[in-house]
Image (tube, rainbow, N blue to C red):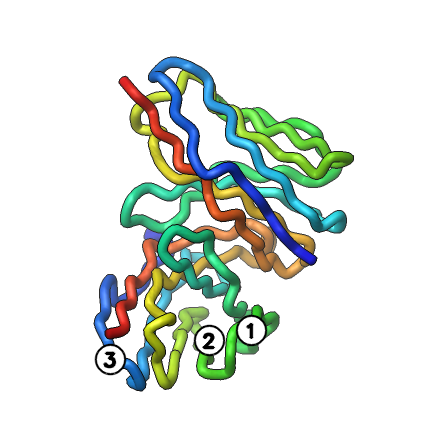
Amino acid sequence: GEDVEQSLFLSVREGDSSVINCTYTDSSSTYLYWYKQEPGAGLQLLTYIFSNMDMKQDQRLTVLLNKKDKHLSLRIADTQTGDSAIYFCAESSSNTGKLIFGQGTTLQVKP
Amino acid sequence: DAGVTQSPTHLIKTRGQQVTLRCSPKSGHDTVSWYQQALGQGPQFIFQYYEEEERQRGNFPDRFSGHQFPNYSSELNVNALLLGDSALYLCASSPWDRPLEQYFGPGTRLTVT
């Protein structure tokens, strides 16, 4: 079946790098996503990666995909207090875009 | 360019009542998906509408129904509300040429008492 798992909490100091990890079970996953949710808000699409890629970089964000281990990570360089939020990993194996989400990782950035 | 908008922002209903939530997609987007996010959880897919038809459905009972209008806006209806229906309901829209890019609205917080 489809399942996405994430660690629940990560705490870092401002200026450090953050690495948020995610594992998924569906080997037919085609697209893998990272979303950010701030308190009381909807989800903001940060980035996504096709399953035939192993890395994608976008400014301070780097996504790494290990398809063999079904492991996805999001690295945030030079983490700022404004990066404090819940980060959701999601996968889609359907060309219609049904997303399966993990339970979210709360990132706490200490000044 | 407005993003995805949803109304109302908050809603309080009583068990057994019915509720209608509304979503307007981003300009240029023709596909609308609905998700339910319980407190402390990730969003769960309810269903998706394209060309005014339900294209795909998640594991939700028939009490959850929807509609898409010719202008691509959408409604989510929930009948016979249960306490467990209390959640944040999120709408997401996708453009016709990039259906896998989903952009979310701010959500409607539904509380059932």
The N terminus of chain A - image quarter = bottom right
Q: Residue at x 28, y 66 (%)?
A: B7
Query: Is residue A97 left or right of A1 when viewed as pictured?
Result: left
Above or below, B33 relative to B76: above
> Foreground: A6 or B69?
A6
Q: Which residue is mark 2?
A: B68
Q: CA distance from mark 1 to mark 3?
A: 33 Å
- The amino acid beneath tag 2 is Gln
Q: Which mark is residue B51?
A: 1
Which residue corresponds to the image point at 23% horizontal and 69% vertical from the top-left? B11
Closest to the observer: A8 or B45?
Answer: A8
Q: What's the amino acid at mark 1?
A: Glu
Residue A77 image point, x, y percent: 46, 18
- Whether B13 is drawn above or below A78: the answer is below
Relative image position of residue A28 (x, y in whole percent)? 75, 50
On screen, residue B109 versus residue B66, left or right, reads left
Discs 2, 1 touching: Cβ within 8 Å: yes
Identify the subunit bearing mark 2: B
Q: Which residue is mark 3?
A: B14
Could you tell which of marks 3 and 2 lies nearer the N-terminus?
3
- Using the image, tell me which numbered label, if any, was put on residue A3: none
**Callout 3 secondary element:** loop
Residue pictured at 53% horizontal, 69% vertical: B47
The C terminus of chain A lies in quadrant: top left
Q: Is residue A47 depicted above or below A80 in this figure? A: below
